[in-house]
Amino acid sequence: MRKNSPTSKGILSSLKIGLKTGLVGAILTVLLSLIGMVEAFSQRYIIHEVISMGHTLLLLSGYFIADRAARRSISKGKSLALLNSLISGFLSSGSLILLIFLGAFVNLRSVFINASPVLYQLLLFGEEIRTGVLLLFFVGGVVGFFSGLLYLLTGWIKKLTLIPLGSILIAGVLQDLLRPTLAAWGPLSILSEWIFTANGLSISGAIVLGVSISIGSLLWSFKGKSLQRGIKSLSGSKRKIFTYAGFLTLVFLLLVLPHLLGLFLSEVLTIVGLYILLGLGLNIVVGYAGLLDLGYVAFFAIGAYTTAILTSQELGFFHFTFWSALPIAILMGIFSGVLLGIPVLKMRGDYLAIATLGFGEIIRILVLSDFLRPWLGGAQGIGKIPKASIGSFEFARPQEIYYLILAGCLLVVFISLRLKDSRIGRAWMAMREDEDVAQAMGINLVSTKLLAFATGAGFSALSGAIFASKLGSVYPHSFNVMISINVVCLIIVGGMGSIPGVMVGAFALVGLPELLREFAEYRLLVYGAALVVMMLLKPEGLWPEAIRRRELHEEPGEKLSNDSTQGTSGS
Amino acid sequence: MAFLEIEEIHAYYGHIHALKGVSLYVEKGEIVTLIGANGAGKSTMLKTTSGLLSPRHGSIRFEGEELTRYRPHEIVAKGVVQVPEGRRVFGRLTVRENLEMGAFALSDPKLIEANLERVFNLFPRLKERQKQVAGTLSGGEQQMLATGRALMANPRVLLMDEPSMGLAPVLVDNIFNTIRQLHAQGTTILLVEQNARKALEVASRGYVLQSGVMVLTDTAQNLQRNEMVRKAYLGET
Ligand SMILES: Nc1ncnc2c1ncn2[C@@H]1O[C@H](COP(=O)(O)OP(=O)(O)OP(=O)(O)O)[C@@H](O)[C@H]1O
Ligand SMILES: [Mg+2]
């Protein structure tokens, strides 16, 4: 490499990286604008009347693209890296200027319905066109330069820039979560009123938040290490007390959570919880046993419909309570898991995925059919499903159903943990790594596979049963293929085979979109983008299983992306 | 009645008739080698024996018991254990985890511990690298691991599929030394090899397979002298 004395030709060729990466940024910012995301998100502020989420989206894309540019050209020297990120920043905003000019001459709206005057106004920061364009171009450059500079910086300055900005961003994105949570805590409600406005953080709130979190992190890095060392040096019994105290705090938090969060957030939490149950079940099938099952929603439906048939007063066939219907629903799930497993025993990989995908649809279509309408209610579904209750305590509101789901999650986590370390868990692992060799090792493939399908299906049916009682009614359209896909996505994003990964994945892919209402329309797009970005940057998942972490950590991290053959990595 | 007796086996892959009435036997404590060119059906023969492939006709008896009606995991439990072709170790598991996986069919922890000891004695290299991820082992080490993993199952007959494939000459010598050691410890071995010279040196008897047909069988010494074997498999003119 020409590190020291770059010839003019060398410089030109190294600027290619900035141009190429910038082009990706250009496409990204224009895309975000044209699909309407910028406009949709502009309704909501990160900092009230200062910066909207729409603008943040563009700034972040510019930032990450410029960061990529710097990373990829750092081998050519620091100044070139900075230059490259500057170029990519200019390109990212320049493309928006082109879009604005194009929009002024041609009516883009006949094709791109979002290319509206409102969008242009947003991109021009509400200024008149000449000032706006200059400002936009300038902002692009600043973001690019800033990103490159931050990449080159190390240590304190970098941390003290990123931490306050990051915490303001997170507080702004999660405002719907934080504001009501803080408000529920008597004394903190004043603080919450002061930090947050009805829409976004207040300016003074943002400043104080940024400063206080920076100071906190500074203190932690000075004192934290000695504190940790202090805990470590404690004697055995004292350390035990610490672990117990931590554990008890966690239990206490889990128990009081719905009271802190209130109705809306508890509802979000129950949805996330149901997905965690589903995810932990599919994690056994996909993560532990390596069988890609895309028809997983079928067992969710079977659990829900079994509960509905057994308990619904509208149907009146049976008059089971939720608790007596639950084991039957789980057994039905297990049974159908085995039933699905038998025909697909010999299938692997893509073929298995397609066959199971079909199974999921078959169940939904069966439920919709006229033939089964007298029993399953067809498209109208089944209503009047009673709530679960213990004595006179009824699991009716989200705050109460939360406990039902929490209990389910704890049970399923416990079973998953035990299974993983068991003999059957080792058989699953061997089968996932190499089916033929597993067989040559004395592993019974038939029973091992069927057990994986059955366990996963049982967990899913449990989730379905709770879902039915939570909603009070079941409809076929609640059980479409999107549920299976959501669950697969959350496992991949969280980290296959990892129990905490499933939880992180569920919060990120199910919880976050619920908090950001504007996401709803772009949910699939965001899922797709999240998957692509994960595959590029962290293919092992957000919280990977030990084995997968092992596999991917041999390569020296960033070295790979210096290669300029990689054309389309971004955001 | 021989220890392992294979009689008139016909095996198919779809329409491909891979084994056309093949027979062989192995006596207890013996090393028998099966040689043949690429695609002759050697691996197919081992797969059929270990139950990974069901023959259409013919019988395979181990100590007089018909094996063809058992499933692969049951055959392993009876002590017929295969070292698969191409050292297929579990690449993401550690050396030790691989070995433990090999003992899957066993349940007695003391026995497993004893087997582990035995494998580590045979391959001190594996002991040093217990915690290493198997996928990062060298080719020779992976072959040791694949062999060690099969030994963990307490094999009474070891079916080895081309253990010397793709190894440097020094390592090939190593592997054959191991085979001699195993033989000395009383393990019965059916050895599939392309390296006919080495295989015939360690084996007591040999078979020659050609396009799914057994064309020749004799003692190893006689085969080493056989005109056809020398031309086709020992590379002499
Ligand atoms: N899974 C399969 N499907 C179809 N044909 C197969 C399959 N496996 C092997 N064959 C065919 O069966 C024949 C015998 O294959 P086999 O693997 O037994 O050969 P081999 O003697 O072990 O060769 P090598 O020395 O190259 O390993 C070959 O013609 C091969 O193409
Ligand atoms: Mg072969």
Image: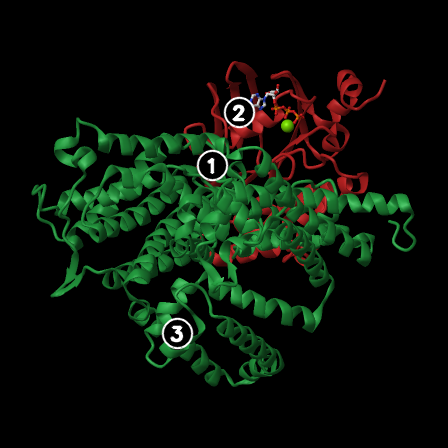
Chain colours: A green, B red
**Taking B215 as reference, is A93 above or below it?**
below
Choose mark 1 or mark 3, whichever is in front.
Answer: 1
Q: CA distance from mark 3 to mark 2?
A: 84 Å
Q: Dot 1: within a 10 Å radius of its alpha carbon, few (fewer than 14), some, or many (20 or more) residues?
A: few
Q: Is label 3 within 8 A of ligand 1 (CB to nearest ligand atom)?
A: no
Relative vertical location of residue B187 with respect to residue A546 in this rendering, above or below: above
Provide residue A447's location: percent of width, then percent of height: 38, 40
Instruction: Say which residue label 1 marks.
Output: A113
Residue occupied by mark 2: B6
Amino acid at pointer 2: Ile
In 3D space, how far apart are the residues under numbered discs 1 and 3 (Cα atoms)?
38 Å
Disc 2 secondary structure class = strand
- Looking at the rendered structure, the number of numbered marks drawn on it comes to 3
Give the percent coordinates (x, y) of residue B136. 68, 49
Residue at the image position 44 percent from the left and 62 percent from the top: A174
The percent coordinates of residue A189 (x first, y second) are 36, 76
Is disc 2 surrounded by few (<14), some (14 to 19) or many (20+) residues within 10 Å?
A: many
Numbered mark located on residue B39 in the image = none
